[in-house]
Amino acid sequence: MGPKESTGRRRALPYARTLAIGVAGLFALSGCVSQPAPPPVTVVVTQQPDPSPSVAPVPTSTARDALPPEPAPIVPNAPAEPAEPLPEGPAFDLGPRDGALGPVATDAEGNPLTYTVVAGDVFFDIAQRFDLPQQQLLRMNPSIPGLGLDIYIGDIVNLDWTTTR
């Protein structure tokens, strides 16, 4: 063997090792290939008819006047109908409650005439105590400012629906 021949083998040796490792890796990975999936199974379902068919209910006709009336068509920007005025009536004392704990002055028959505001009273609760709509109580008391938000200790609230104060 000459000097040129031995250097050629030395150069070929790393290539041969790389090739051998690559082939061994391919053989090792060849077992990792999965088996092909089995073909899909076709299922056929047949439906048997009912031995005793049921009879569907037949809709009955309804008289026209038994149906609810047709709603009136909505007209955009139409003037609104006037609201019904709140019914006015006498005050009934339902008893003290939070926000309406003040004393009540009554007439000879026991009808409430006036209410005196105490600390912690709220105009809405006063109206609730005497079973009156807040708007009616405001109409009966035009001297109370701020829609009833500005009441003060010692103010007298009129409860007689036939007079204003």
Image: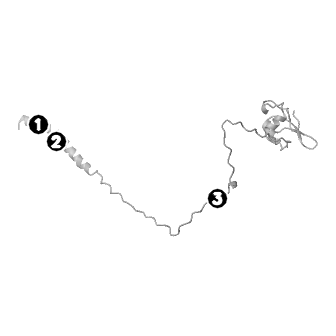
Q: Nearer the viewer, residue 28 or 59?
A: 59
Q: Quadrant of residue 121?
A: top right
Q: Residues within 10 Å of mark 2 (few under 14, many from 20)?
A: few
At 11% from the left and 36% from the top, the residue drawn is 8
Using the numbered discs, state the Cα–Cα distance from disc 1 to disc 2 in whole angstroms: 12 Å
Using the numbered discs, state the Cα–Cα distance from disc 1 to disc 3 in whole angstroms: 107 Å
Using the numbered discs, state the Cα–Cα distance from disc 3 to disc 2 in whole angstroms: 96 Å
Q: In the rendered structure, which amino acid carries the disc numbered 3? A: Ser
| Residue bearing mark 3 | 61
| Residue bearing mark 2 | 16
Are discs 1 and 3 less than 8 Å apart at CB?
A: no
> Helix, strand, or loop for circle 1?
helix
Residue 8, numbered circle: 1
| Mark nearer the viewer, 3 or 2 | 3
- Image coordinates of residue 115 in percent, x first then y, are 86, 37
Task: Please tell me how many numbered marks the rendered image carries.
Answer: 3
